[in-house]
Amino acid sequence: MSITIRPLTPGLADDFLHFFDHVAFCDHQDWAGCYCMEGHRKSGDDLFSYFGQKNRACARELILSGRMHGYLAYDGDQVIGWCNADNKRNYLYLTTNASCWPRKDEGLRIMSMYCLTIAPQRRRQGLGTMLLQRVIADAAAQGYDLVEAYPWQEDSTEYAYHGTARMLERLGFERAGEFRDQHSDMHIYQKRL
């Protein structure tokens, strides 16, 4: 397996969109219209009202304007994975949910790993770990204080798009809290850099 991990740039917008159009959720059509927009919506929004072409258009606009960040995993020229990672302050979902900001974290530079999506036939092969290792390395190089992730409290395969607690713990993350709203019941995991 020859895997390349590339930061998302406007020039890779078509690769990102093709991955979400045809690959990411070919086994879970209920989620096929997400285009990784959950973190870019406000806490409390009806996320499903945006599914499909609305999310696709918004994702395209964010990528082309340089406001969506993350990493694409390639096998040759095929995208087989995606990790949505950016400064925590750039995610509306997190900035509009006060329980996402424990008092001890005020003033810190936090890189959030918001979403991790792997092609169905490539899951459980270590790609999520590879993507997250790249996030950690780049965050450290950019002077962040910590990396944060938000696995669901119900640790099932269906809800693993935020990563799993087990994977995060293997990479040195520790549970730092939890948050809830009408859509979410998630842990906050952090890794100090």
Image (cartoon, rainbow, N blue to C red):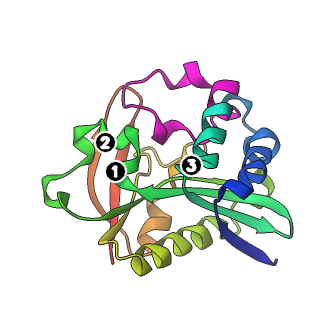
User: Relative to the observer, which residue lies in front, 104 or 163?
Assistant: 104
The location of residue 27, given as percent across then percent down, is 77, 40
Look at the numbered disc 1 and give the secondary structure of its residue: helix
Task: Name the residue rendered at 44%, 46% in the picture.
Answer: 152
- Say which residue label 1 marks: 89
Compared with residue 50, is residue 9 higher up or lower down, i.e. above or below? below
| Mark 1 in CB contact with mark 2 (< 8 angstroms) | yes
Where does the N terminus fall, quadrant-wise? bottom right
Q: Amino acid at mark 3?
A: Tyr
The location of residue 120, given as percent across then percent down, is 76, 51
User: Relative to the observer, which residue lies in front, 123 or 136?
Assistant: 136
| Res 52 visible | no
Look at the numbered disc 3 and give the secondary structure of its residue: helix
Q: Amino acid at mark 2?
A: Thr
Compared with residue 80, is residue 152 higher up or lower down, i.e. above or below? above
Task: Name the residue rendered at 64%, 25% in the picture.
Answer: 54
Q: Amino acid at mark 1?
A: Arg
User: Does residue 39 belong to the magenta stretch?
Assistant: yes
- Say which residue label 3 marks: 161
Left or right: residue 164 versus residue 97 is right
User: Relative to the observer, which residue lies in front, 168 or 81?
Assistant: 81
Total labels drawn? 3
Residue 75 occupies quadrant? bottom right
Which of labels 1 and 3 is toward the front?
A: 1
Left or right: residue 49 versus residue 99 is right
